[in-house]
Image (cartoon, helix red, strand yellow):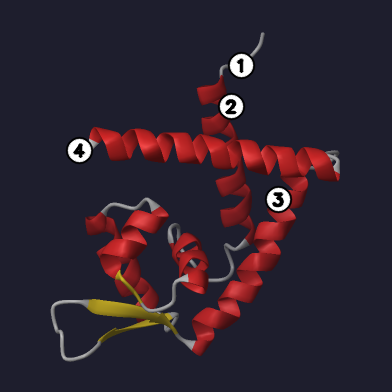
Amino acid sequence: MKESIHYLLMSDHMLVQKALLGSIKDSGLTSGQPKILDYLKDHDGSVQKDIAAGCHIEPASITVILRGMETKGYIERKSLGGDRRSLYVFLTDKGKEYISYLNEKFDKVENVATDGFSKEEKEMFQSLLAKVYENMTEHFEKEDM
């Protein structure tokens, strides 16, 4: 029986998440935190609302996750330019160390997931996933208008 695309996307996501979370269980990172550290790697100094949008996490959930990350010393939140309404989130040295650790884990999980793929197949797969993301993003942006 040929599985549907939505079933395969959900199942693959669940298995990748399970593998990643299993591989970092001794790190002290909780669900949601790896995604935020990965986002901050390229967007250090972001506001909370942008992190939530970039990580596809509900704003109420992001507050709790960031509070835990701040307590563990992965991030620090600061107001810039005297604007106390917006807190900007920055990686600490400890957070930056964990990004290297996470990149190793992400690479291992991706290598398992794409075992037996040629270089061209990996590139095509990444391209197709990017296209799915682009299609879904455009759909939801139009829906919000």
> Mark 2 falls on what kind of element?
helix
Kindly tell me whether residue 11 is visible in this rendering.
yes
The location of residue 82, given as percent across then percent down, is 16, 91
Mark 2 and mark 1 lie on one chain; the one further toward the N terminus is 1
Alpha carbon of mark 1 to alpha carbon of mark 3: how far? 22 Å
Identify the residue at image location x=58%, y=27%.
8
Q: Nearer the viewer, residue 21 or 96?
A: 96
On the image, numbered disc 4 is attached to which residue? 145
Q: Which amino acid does label 1 sit on?
A: Glu
Identify the residue at image location x=42%, y=84%.
73
| Quadrant containing the N terminus in the rendered view | top right
Q: Do the residues labelled 4 and 1 touch (CB within 8 Å)?
A: no
> Mark 1 falls on what kind of element?
loop
Looking at the picture, does residue 12 appear above or below residue 61? above
> Mark 4 falls on what kind of element?
loop
Alpha carbon of mark 2 to alpha carbon of mark 1: how far? 7 Å
> What crowding class fits label 4: few (fewer than 14 Cα within 10 Å), some (14-19), or many (20 or more)?
few
Alpha carbon of mark 3 to alpha carbon of mark 4: how far? 36 Å
Mark 4 and mark 1 lie on one chain; the one further toward the N terminus is 1
Q: What residue type is labelled 3?
A: Glu
> Mark 3 falls on what kind of element?
helix
Looking at the picture, does residue 67 appear above or below residue 124? below
On the image, numbered disc 3 is attached to which residue? 110
Alpha carbon of mark 2 to alpha carbon of mark 3: how far? 16 Å
Alpha carbon of mark 4 to alpha carbon of mark 1: how far? 33 Å
Q: Are marks 2 and 1 in contact (CB under 8 Å)?
A: yes
On the image, numbered disc 1 is attached to which residue? 3
Q: Do the residues labelled 4 and 2 touch (CB within 8 Å)?
A: no
